[in-house]
Amino acid sequence: MCGICGVYRNQGRPVVVEELRTMADTMMHRGPDEDGFMVNGSIGLGFRRLSIVDLAHGHQPMTNEDRSVWVICNGEIYNHKFLRAQMESRGHVFASSSDTEVIVHLYEEYGIDLVQHLRGMFAISIVDLKSRDLYLIRDPFGIKPLYFSHTSDGLTFASDLRSLLAVHPYFSLNEQAMWDYFTFQYVPAGESLIRGIEKVPPAHILRYRDGTLSRYQYWRPEYKPRYDMSFDDFTEALREGLQKSVHSHLQGDVRVGSFLSSGVDSSTLAAIAAREQDLMTFSVGFEDAAPHLDELKFAKQTAQLLGLRNEFEVISSKDIWTDLPVMLDALEEPLGDPSALALYYLSELAKRHVTVVLSGEGADELFGGYPIYHEPKSLALFKHLPNWSTTLARRVGESMPYGMKGKSFLLRGTTPLERRFLGNIHVFHEDVKHTLFESGAFLREPNPTYRITDPIYRQNHHVDEITRMQIIDLNTWLPGDILLKADKMTMAHSLELRVPFLDTDLFELASTVPTEYRVFEKQGKYVLRQAAAQWLPKEVRERPKLGFPVPYRKWLRESMGQLLWDVFQSSSIRHYFSARYVEDMLLQHRSGARDYGRELWTLLSFLMWYQVFEGRVQVGQNAVEWQQVGPAS
């Protein structure tokens, strides 16, 4: 795993290596082992390396024989040995066993279509000095991050947002992204909270040449169920696919461990990996956790049942007080997902023993594991009601007091899927955000957040509601929240995280599984649980998902609630928010009258993020704008 960066100046203006070094030095945590640079006139590349494959010869940037093609890559190409053999059979000569060198020769053979041959996680930049093209490529699911800024001066990019701020320190707050954040609890793929900085979206290629930026999507997740296979056929195929994926994710020249939670996802990966090598697993828990949410207890039980070595740690609320600003600095973006805390400590623990870990991200999205995916079945009766009945049901729901049984059922049942489901988490609805934010606080009225999900719904109108929900999560929640925190929290400790479920070959198999095999009666990931019977006992396979539960609701009712109010009162950005509404949420939550835990944590994360980055991100009419050019084609 590594950190990459680069600059392409317009009008032939030269790049200096000191600028690249400044950018690369901010990513020391991503690559503590060595650095590397390439400058050719107006184009420059920078690199920080965490050595995993070919420790002695895997230096980057890498080039071809005539030094006309240069490549830097953050990630792992899991089929690089197969691709190397293909290229060697066509006369290509290799100087190392690095997976990055394979990309160099693939580009010589296929051009930018090389991306269709890659299996792995990656953020790649390719420079073709003959055509003066610079390409940015991000993997299909968005496992590895890649930020960029396109201005009248040229293009700048990096694995970390902080690297761009190091050379262009003055930006203004992206109010549209802020509006979207308070819906999702994360900044959606493609956006950042800083105007002038974007993310390369998952499965996209950007090409830059002499001031012109173009982009296109080379892959998208699609479900095409097959009905010519039996359930047993699917479980057997899935077992084989999982074993192949885990095997490829264990490659490298350093020791690999595995995160272990209480659920079927990480347990399945650990059980398969333990058959190939002596595997160490890692788990964390919180001392304030309620007994039924004590993930550590169940993880230790799983490790014992499977005969796995398990290192664990119990986190106290005092640790959180101290480390929260450090975590937000590592995230570089606010994130209202408290499980990021667990991942931070889990990564710190694992790094004491290994350099690479396996983790179960992606299984819920691929196989239908979230409880919300059962909702279309429970609301199906509303589809058969006449219009007058639906209207009446909605009016009844709206008139019912908060907390009354049946209110949510009536409101959600009479709301179209496209408006009630924007992803796995929906923190503040559009109408509530108009109450949260002060009237006139934004320089211009933000666009509705629905603009992000509506195109995805239109592209997938032909599939059932459960599948549409999965596809929404694959495009929004997975890259925006799950993979963001996974990358940032592990990289904060120079730990490489690998996600075997997010293998494109495995997805192609999962996409053929009929919906009723994914979500069966009251059980999600049904086909995965049955496939795992080969490795896991029933009590582990059927254990309900916990997902690194963090007792943040309890903390906010206690001393952290006061912390939130103090941070809010002292924040230079508080003018955006209605102080009365924030205080009311806090009072109701602390008294137990209403659960505002998720809303308050989302707000606290935003305020503390701004506190950490204040001085580099400005707001309002006085913000110093870094001049932008028009949007890419």
Image (tube, grey):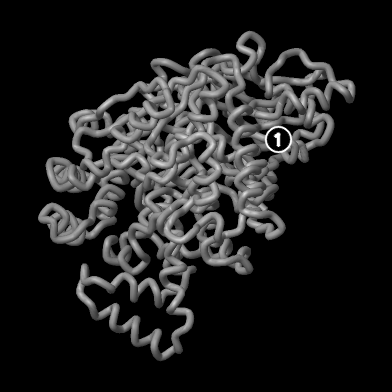
Asked whether, in this view, residue 47 is left or right of residue 288, the answer is: right
Label 1: how many residues lie within 10 Å, few (<14), some (14-19) or many (20+)? many
- Residue 373 lies, with reference to residue 57, above or below; the image says below
- Residue 441 lies, with reference to residue 484, above or below; the image says below
Residue placed most toward the observer, 41 or 425: 425
- Residue 360: x and y in percent read 48, 37
Which residue is pictured at 26% across the width and 45% down the height? 604
- Residue 84: x and y in percent read 77, 23
Asked whether, in this view, residue 127 is left or right of residue 266, the answer is: right
State which quarter of the image contains the N terminus. Answer: top right
Element marked by disc 1? loop
Which residue is pictured at 16% across the width and 46% down the height? 561
Which residue is pictured at 71% across the width and 26% down the height? 80
Which residue is pictured at 18% across the width and 45% down the height? 554
Query: Is residue 329 something that shows in the picture?
Result: no
Q: Amino acid at mark 1?
A: Leu
Asked whether, in this view, residue 217 is left or right of residue 527, the answer is: right
Q: What residue did someone put label 1 on?
A: 118
- Residue 562: x and y in percent read 13, 44
- Residue 352 lies, with reference to residue 245, above or below; the image says above
- Residue 166 lies, with reference to residue 504, above or below; the image says above
Q: How many marks?
A: 1
